[in-house]
Amino acid sequence: SQQGEEDPQALSIQEGENATMNCSYKTSINNLQWYRQNSGRGLVHLILIRSNEREKHSGRLRVTLDTSKKSSSLLITASRAADTASYFCATTGTASKLTFGTGTRLQVTL
Amino acid sequence: NAGVTQTPKFQVLKTGQSMTLQCAQDMNHNSMYWYRQDPGMGLRLIYYSASEGTTDKGEVPNGYNVSRLNKREFSLRLESAAPSQTSVYFCASSEQSSGNTIYFGEGSWLTVV
């Protein structure tokens, strides 16, 4: 069963706008990761945030984690057409296995 | 440095046929994984190998077998393919199995008719 659930399922924005995706999970985690998947390709790791961290930045990416609400958000600032992809959150819990959510499909139009 | 390489890229099978998906990584990672991805769903873990010589079932192991041939290679076998196994299969690896970053192959598109 999926541990994480992303919201929204699909998001369409214009280039230059910010994109925010949310992930909710069910059980306690050790860390949470975000991955990107371009159409027809494998997943690529974006960022990892540990359970004792609240916010992390990497370039145009900002990830927050609220363990009390069991949720995380991924913000992509100043989006580009090349950001068009599906984005997945993945959690690691006590079983140390990475469990993926169902993904958010982001479309960035010119 | 090729990362994770999996073959074949595309395969069509008839129901009941068998086949093996091959996977190799050149990053000296200890852990390797096989996932399947179906439309509208995330990735589901089929089998994983935390280290050379060990394999364990994931979320959806039925109908599959795996072999960790050596540290580099981890193969997935479908003994008697079924239409429900039509999917995209991803091999992946990580340094350790405990929540490290996972590196994925490019995927294998399998259709069972």
Image (spheres, coloured by chain):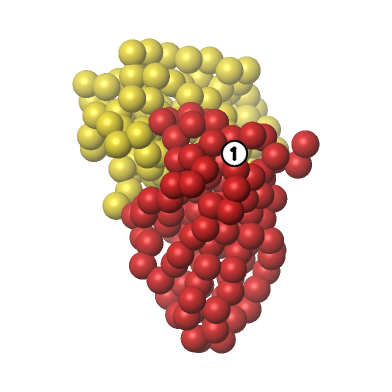
Chain colours: A yellow, B red
Location of residue B19 with respect to B104 vertically, above or below: below
Location of residue A104 with respect to B19 vertically, above or below: above
Horizontal placement of A61 versus A24: left or right? Answer: right
Horizontal placement of A28 versus B64: left or right? Answer: left
Residue at 48% of width from left, 40% of height from top? B51
Q: Nearer the viewer, residue A42 or B4?
A: B4
Q: Residue A105's spot in the image, x, y percent? A: 52, 47
- Residue B12: quadrant of the picture: bottom right
Residue B91 visible in image: yes
Q: Residue B41's spot in the image, x, y percent? A: 42, 56
Badge 1 element: strand
- Residue B64: quadrant of the picture: bottom left
Identify the residue at the far right of this view.
Answer: B1
Q: Residue B3's spot in the image, x, y percent? A: 70, 40
Q: Amino acid at mark 1?
A: Tyr
Badge 1 is on which residue?
A: B103
Q: Chain of mark 1?
A: B
